[in-house]
Amino acid sequence: MITAAHQQLTQEWWQNRGAHFDLYASQLVVREASAGDAEMAQKRLLLLEKLPLLALSEASVDLARLLVTQGPIPEKAAVDALHIAIATAHGMDFLITWNCKHIANAEMQTALTSVCRSAGYEPPVICTPEELSGS
């Protein structure tokens, strides 16, 4: 039920709010969007194919490593650290996700921000689509 609600909120966000932002994705997002139900994956990929992809850079890999070794992201969630690092290294204003365990987790924000700033970056605001609804 929660997943269905998240899916509905995400669809509404893309329809009502997406045009208000310069949207980007990464190859990690494309890979994750490809998983699961084939019909739903195809719908996700159609949306993503219109977006420019942020490159996986050495800087983002280095920052992801710091988020794991010096920050709150556990080694088992290194790919989550990479999502954060790619957005941060590219200077994104927002990182939108439903991953509230390791990415959009308010308890981790202070430590994430500290690691990013120590490395010379200003991290994006990390939030769910619902939090970036404009209302």
Image (cartoon, grey):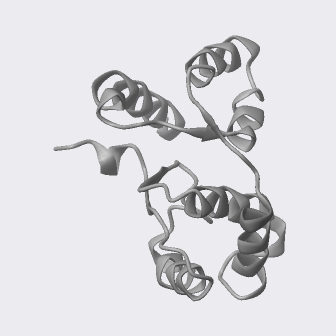
Residue at 70%, 65% in the rendered image: 81
Where residue 110 sits: x, y (%)?
47, 84
Quarter of the picture containing the C terminus is top left
In this view, the residue in front, 33 or 63, is 63
The answer to which image quadrant residue 70 occupies is: bottom right
Where residue 67 sits: x, y (%)?
69, 77
Residue at 74%, 43% in the rendered image: 28
Which residue sits furthest top? Answer: 39
Left-right relation of 58 to 18 = right
Left-right relation of 11 to 65 = left
In this view, the residue in front, 80 or 52, is 52
The answer to which image quadrant residue 62 occupies is: bottom right
Residue at 69%, 20% in the rendered image: 41
In the rendered image, the vertical position of residue 53 relative to residue 62, given as above or below = above
In the rendered image, the vertical position of residue 17 relative to residue 122, given as above or below = above
Which residue sits furthest left? Answer: 135
Where residue 7 sits: x, y (%)?
48, 30
Left-right relation of 44 to 106 = right
- Counting every numbered tag in the picture gives 0
Where residue 72 sits: x, y (%)?
65, 81
Residue at 43%, 54% in the rendered image: 94
In the rendered image, the vertical position of residue 76 relative to residue 69, given as above or below = above
